[in-house]
Amino acid sequence: MVERIPTYTSAQVRAAEKPLLDAGEPLMRRAAAALARIAAVELGPNGGRVLVLVGSGDNGGDALFAAADLAEISDTVVDVFLTADRVHAAGLGAAIAAGARKVDLPEVISAASGYDLVLDGILGIGASADPALRGTARTVVQELLPVVRAGRPRVIAVDVPSGLQPNDGSSDGVVLPASITVTFGAVKSGLTAGSGPERTGAIVLVDLGLTTALAGQEPAGAASVTAVVQA
């Protein structure tokens, strides 16, 4: 069932998360577990092959903990590609311990059309005012764009599609178009503004308990959401 819910800026979401994080709530693990469940449904009962694109920030941590959960599913192969030298160490350790393997760029390019699903966890709401991907992240997305546009693999964006500005939806076009964007806590305003609708696909909101904290905030807009999932 599609429902209309408010959207918020990244600053509003961060402010709403802060009291929970300060209280020690494991928001990353809860978000990652929900992401993995959604990805598993997309793969179907026979599993498949998943590529996880990992950035240096919390978004990459979300993707890595989800990779760990997915790697434990029978008949599911999980490859992890690190787009930066810095990485969420605990998340990477969990993914590798669960059976995921690190791959390099040539392996990603050669196997691109053989993946069933890509988890795009390069950038989240920590993206700067200029969200354009750079370096290795830009290279891997440019290499994957032709096969994604051809229909295989499908992409799940982690919180926001990487390269999309989370507040105004601007981008330079080097963004993997998602079939689904699994967004955490609240829908970010950039998913429905600018080029957001072209890149985002269906929006699934993972409820992290931010409703009370956001109640006093003025929404940036509204979005049509296909599902609200409890973390």
Image (spheres, rainbow, N blue to C red):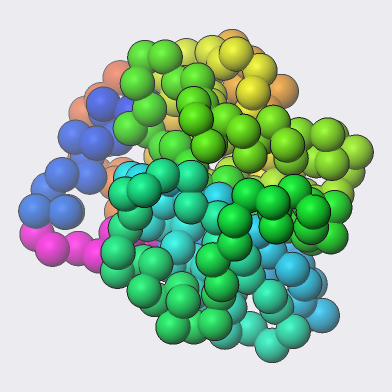
Which of the 4 image quadrants contains residue 64?
bottom left
Q: Is residue 6 above or below residue 81?
A: above
Whether residue 215 can be seen here: no
Which of the 4 image quadrants contains residue 70?
bottom right
Instruction: Point out the stretch of residues depicted in magenta.
Output: 23-31
Q: Residue furthest right?
A: 150
Q: Residue furthest left?
A: 22
Residue 193 on image: x %, y %: 56, 15
Image position of 103 (left or right of 87): right
Q: Nearer the viewer, residue 50 or 231?
A: 50
Query: Residue drawn 60% across and 13% down?
Result: 172
Query: Residue drawn 42% across and 37% down?
Result: 124
Q: Nearer the viewer, residue 192 or 213?
A: 192
Whether residue 50 can be seen here: yes
Q: Is residue 226 above or below residue 221?
A: below
The C terminus is located in which quarter?
bottom left
Image position of 82 (left or right of 175): left
Q: Nearer the viewer, residue 215 or 65?
A: 65
Residue 118 on image: x %, y %: 67, 53
Residue 36 on image: x %, y %: 55, 67
Q: Is residue 86 above or below residue 89?
A: above
Residue 26 on image: x %, y %: 25, 65
The mark tally for this picture is 0
Image position of 108 (left or right of 194): right
Query: Residue drawn 24% across and 36% down?
Result: 14
Assess whether residue 119 is covered by the magenta stretch: no
Query: Residue drawn 63% across and 83% down?
Result: 73
